[in-house]
Image: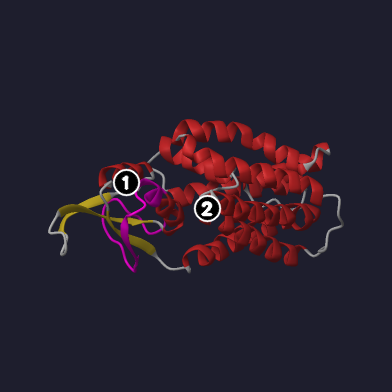
Amino acid sequence: MWKERKKYGIIFAGAVLYAFSVALILKPNQLAPGGASGLAIMISYFTGIKTGTIILILNIPLIIAGVRAFGKEFLYGTMFAIFINSIFVNLFEEFPAPLHDMFLASVCGGTLDAVSLGIILRQGGTTGGTDIVAKILRKRMPQFEMGKLFILVDMVVVALSAFVFGNIENAIYSAICVVITGQVMDRILYGGQGARMLFIISDSAEKISRRLIDMDTGITYLKGRGGYTDREKNVIICVMRKRLLPAALKMIREKDEKVFMIVTLAEKVVGEGYRENE
């Protein structure tokens, strides 16, 4: 119970920080850095509807699609983060903006987005939008790399902002914000290093393997023998893209609280089933 409260408390803090960035830094400077939040900023600009309300509406069909594609485990942390984010975006819009310089806004907004998203992702949640769309596209079109799908979805929104706000400068600064968010978030979550290699020893190896495969991560079984127990066990070895690690570790611990894992940096990965730029 305490772990769950702590988890949702941390997600709450991340969602509030993200809302601050959207409502008081990005929107006042007409920056739309991809995803549902970027679309919501543009729609609000035209309609006058509160940005948080639009974020919530845009994410409802995405949440439903995400649950259908990935199951109910996907729902709870993501829905909570979206709901809190939407409420606080609407609240923060009532306050004056602290920045009116587009370059500073793109840097500060990108950094705050990265910190807040990193907080939420570490707890197994997301803020919806781009994450859900890219995951669904990847499932339907496995020939496309996930990293390219993320960039594609965000950059479509960024390009659209040039037409909505009638200024190419807005789109350029929005793109800068997207790049800063991605780079800073990588360093917050994973230290900016390469892929991660996991060695997993568990009595629930088959259940864990199935879930890892569902996460689009290839696995290999090695035969192991306990030095103390003299029992044979399957050892799972897998290499995954660094951004998948928090969700994978959370899933593994849920399947087996007594699991033994080694997580190490994979400096270079070559071969079928893994691409460095994914």
Q: Residue at x 68, y 66 (%)?
A: 107
Which mark, by number, is residue 130?
Answer: none
| Quadrant in which residue 271 is drawn | bottom left
Q: Amino acid at mark 1?
A: Ile
Task: Judge whether residue 160 can be spotted in this image.
Answer: no
Task: Please tell me which residue lies in front, 94 or 175.
Answer: 94
Image side of residue 92 versus residue 254, left or right: right
Q: Position of residue 117 (x, y in %)?
A: 59, 55
Q: Quadrant of the C terminus?
A: bottom left
Q: Label 2: which residue?
A: 3
Looking at the rendering, the stretch of residues picked out in magenta corresponds to 251-278
Q: Position of residue 251 (x, y in %)?
A: 41, 48
Q: Residue at x 30, y 62 (%)?
A: 269
Image side of residue 65 versus residue 46, left or right: left
Task: Please tell me which residue lies in front, 111 or 147.
Answer: 111
Q: Label 1: which residue?
A: 208
- Residue 252 within the magenta-colored segment of the rendering: yes
Q: Position of residue 127 (x, y in %)?
A: 60, 47
